[in-house]
Image (cartoon, rainbow, N blue to C red):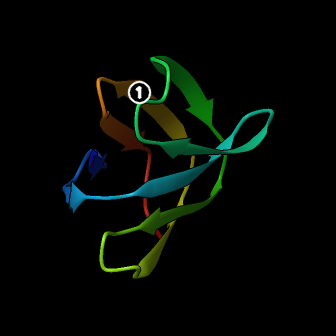
């Protein structure tokens, strides 16, 4: 799966991932390979990214939207702390 985390200023992350956890408006949820297509609003909180190398990166966002379609995840964040 590929993930892009974008803010109005810059591209924060782009790469292959195995799992992503995002802070949804109704609670956080995890996105894995072959997830159903979804668009969801995001609250302030951590985006937890797991890569193939079993590494984990955490980006703290301030609101935004996530779109998942055909194993491509795009997080449009208002900002990243």
Mark 1 sits on what residue? 67
Residue 31 is at least partly visible in this image: yes
Q: Kindly indicate the quadrant of the structure image that contains residue 13.
A: bottom left
Which residue shows up at 45% across the image and 17% down it? 37
Please state if 26 lies on the left or on the right of 68 as rendered: right
Which residue shows up at 59% across the image and 28% down it? 41
Which residue shows up at 43% across the image and 68% down it? 50
Residue 34 in the image, given as x and y percentages of width and height: 41, 30
Please state if 51 lies on the left or on the right of 56 as rendered: left
Q: Which is nearer the eye, 79 or 21? A: 21
User: Vertical placement of 39 versus 59: above or below?
Assistant: above
Residue 12 is at least partly visible in this image: no
SS of the residue under disc 1: strand
Residue 2 in the image, given as x and y percentages of width and height: 24, 47
User: Vertical placement of 59 versus 33: above or below?
Assistant: below
Which residue shows up at 48% across the image and 32% down it? 65
Q: Kindly indicate the quadrant of the structure image that contains residue 79.
A: bottom left
Q: Which is nearer the eye, 45 or 21? A: 21
């Amino acid at each position: 799966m590929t993930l892009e985390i974008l803010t109005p200023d810059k591209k924060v992350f782009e790469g292959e991932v195995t799992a992503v956890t995002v802070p949804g408006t109704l609670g956080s949820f995890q996105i894995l390979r072959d997830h159903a297509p979804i668009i969801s609003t995001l609250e302030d909180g951590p985006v937890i990214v797991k890569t193939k190398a079993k590494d984990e990166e955490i980006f703290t966002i301030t609101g935004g939207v996530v779109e998942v379609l055909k194993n491509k995840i795009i997080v449009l964040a208002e900002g990243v702390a």
